[in-house]
Amino acid sequence: MIAIEQLGKTFQTARGTEHTAIRDISLQVPEGQFMSILGPSGCGKSTLLYIVGGFEQATTGSVKVDGRVINAPGPDRGSVFQEYALFPWKTVLSNVAYGLREQGVPKAQAEEKAMLWLDKVKLKDYAHFYPRELSGGMRQRAAIARTLAYEPAILLMDEPFGALDAHTRLKLQTGLLGLWEQLKNTVLFVTHGVEEAVYLSDRVVVLSGTPGTVREIVDIDLPRPRVRSELLRNSRYQEYVIHLESLLVAEAAA
């Protein structure tokens, strides 16, 4: 579904020098696959995601979705960021309905669908709250509901749980898997967390340090639906975690 070919991105810095964030990245992401992008800080994970989303333009190479070259955002690609990006002056219901309203869906219909998604993420009772009245985990659930409500074929997630406490992060990982197993969106998920990547993904792409290039692609052959308590006793799960950790340690040493 997503074809990334020899992708590169070079920025002009404030000092007038050039900085290459990613270089020569090629990936094929089949429809319905959950792929995580893992790597050290500064390796260009977010840059790669923003180019796929159409928020940044590549310097070299291309991104195609279903054969179409991507050079701008579109409703086929929904994004969820670490910062939640909710409108503080809108209620939770209005936030979730926002993407639908932008697509021309009548208000009553948009709000009805938004309520269905709030129910899916267990926020139905908070529909008329404002973002400032919610916890961080609840705000992120609202942000996920807002993106999924307009049914993008591709979900782009940039460390969506990175700012949350460990307990909330685990709950939202499990909730996300439950939604994905229903919807089967194609997912690109940027993370620093090795265990998170193994738990969620069909494949994990490990990027090298700056500039980011593909160091290794690891297929995660673990049964679905995934139950964390069972995975923790699974030797293959442990082997994947150890292997990916060793790749990151080697990158840090380099």
Image (cartoon, grey):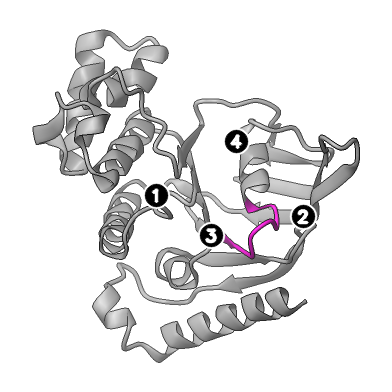
**Circle nearer the N terminus (1, 4):** 4
Query: In the rendered structure, which disc, 1 or 2, sits on the residue that comes first in sequence?
Result: 2
What secondary structure predominates along the stretch shown in magenta? loop
Instruction: Name the foreground residue: 28 vs 96.
Output: 96
Q: Circle 4 is placed at which residue position?
A: 53
Earlier in the chain: of badge 3 and badge 4, it is: 3
Q: CA distance from mark 1 to mark 3?
A: 15 Å
Residue 118's place in the image compared with 172, above or below, is above
Coordinates of residue 97 in the picture (x, y in percent): 29, 21
Viewed as shown, does residue 247 lie left or right of 221? right
Q: Nearer the viewer, mark 1 or mark 3?
A: 3
> Which residue, given by chain and number where applicable, does mark 2 sit on?
25
Label for residue 36?
Answer: 3
The amino acid type, in three-letter code, at marker 1 is Lys
Under tag 1, what secondary structure? loop
Task: Specify the quadrant that holds the N terminus.
Answer: top right
